[in-house]
Image: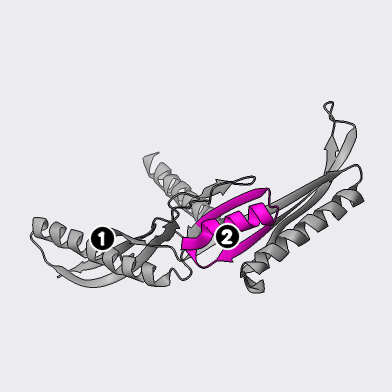
């Protein structure tokens, strides 16, 4: 009996092998891939510092805002009254030596005035705001007196600035870069290295700060005193130095 079972086992094994081959031939091909990407990171050694500097300068330009307003029962009447007041103010501003190019309108408004309940229109109000440049900052007080007392301005605001801030900004910028280099030198000395060439410079800010604006309203009896003071021009930079 044993010689008979051996051929049957062989036959079954062959049949299973054939079936496996058939099944494998009917399956879709499966391709496995492993991506090989090489990433190169370059780290630049350097010393990154910031520098600040402030340069104080006497302002040479005053910016004066002068306004007038009017109120009447109708919008047209308010506008007519405003036009008369604005004409008087503009004539006085030009009479004290302000050129046409230094005078402009910054605001003009006409609107209703409501009663306490907020629904009934009781009148109409008109306002006009002018802005002028006054180049002699030491005499700006006299200009304000003329605009208010003789021009009829009811709203006055004055501030100071530099006519050309670029030279002061350039001076402050050079000082700020020197400050950044001094910090980098101190850091390099502490780390036991030397400061190399400049890799990058960024100007972070440039601003002018007015000492204290002067505001006035109404007529003044005594001559108006407007201290001018100085303007601080501040510059901040960021400098990246290589390690030498």
> Which badge, 2 or 1, is on the more N-terminal residue?
1
Residue furthest toward the top? 117
Colour scheme of the rendered structure = one colour
- Name the residue tied to disc 2: 143
Q: Nearer the viewer, residue 218 or 172?
A: 218
Residue 42 figure quarter? bottom left
Q: Residue at x 78, y 51 (%)?
A: 109
Q: Residue at x 33, y 62 (%)?
A: 237
Where's residue 14, x and y in %?
Answer: 46, 52
Let me know if residue 21 appears in the view: yes
Say if mark 2 contacts mark 1, CB within 8 Å: no
Q: Nearer the viewer, residue 210 or 239?
A: 210
Give the magenta part as a residue range. 130-159
Residue 187 figure quarter? bottom left
Q: Which mark is residue 71?
A: none
Where's residue 179, x and y in %?
Answer: 23, 61
> In terms of secondary structure, where does tag 1 sit?
strand
Q: Is residue 79 above or below residue 162?
A: above
Q: Nearer the viewer, residue 243 or 11?
A: 243
Where's residue 96, x and y in %?
Answer: 62, 67
Q: Residue at x 84, y 52 (%)?
A: 81
- Name the residue tied to disc 1: 48
Where's residue 49, x and y in %?
Answer: 26, 59
Q: Quadrant of the C terminus?
A: bottom left
Q: Quadrant of the N terminus?
A: top left
Q: Is residue 8 found left or right of 191 in the rendered image? A: right
> In terms of secondary structure, where does tag 2 sit?
helix
Queried whether the magenta region covers residue 222, the answer comes back as no
Let me know if residue 44 appears in the view: no
Give the Cα distance between marks 2 and 1.
Answer: 50 Å
């Amino acid at each position: 009996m044993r010689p008979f079972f051996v051929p049957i086992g062989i036959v079954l094994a062959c049949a299973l092998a054939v079936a496996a081959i058939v099944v494998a031939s009917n399956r879709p091909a499966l391709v496995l891939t492993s991506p090989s990407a090489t990433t190169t990171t370059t780290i630049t050694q350097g010393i990154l510092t910031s520098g600040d500097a402030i340069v104080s300068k006497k302002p040479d330009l005053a910016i004066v805002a002068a306004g007038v307003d009017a109120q009447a029962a109708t919008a047209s009447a308010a506008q007519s009254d405003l036009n008369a007041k604005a004409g008087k103010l503009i004539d006085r501003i030009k009479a004290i030596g302000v050129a046409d190019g230094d005078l402009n309108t910054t605001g003009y408004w006409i609107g209703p005035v409501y009663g306490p309940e907020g629904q009934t229109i009781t009148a109409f109000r008109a306002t006009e705001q002018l802005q002028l440049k006054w180049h002699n900052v030491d005499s700006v007080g006299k200009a304000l007196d003329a605009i208010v007392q003789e021009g009829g301005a009811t709203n006055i605001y004055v501030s100071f600035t530099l006519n050309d801030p670029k030279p002061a900004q350039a001076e402050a910028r050079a000082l700020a870069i020197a400050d950044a280099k001094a910090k980098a030198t101190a850091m390099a000395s502490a780390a036991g290295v030397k400061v190399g060439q400049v890799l990058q410079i960024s100007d972070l800010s440039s601003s002018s700060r007015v000492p204290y604006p002067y505001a006035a309203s109404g007529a003044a009896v005594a001559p108006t005193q407007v201290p001018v003071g100085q303007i601080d021009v501040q510059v901040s930079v960021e400098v990246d130095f290589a390690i030498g």
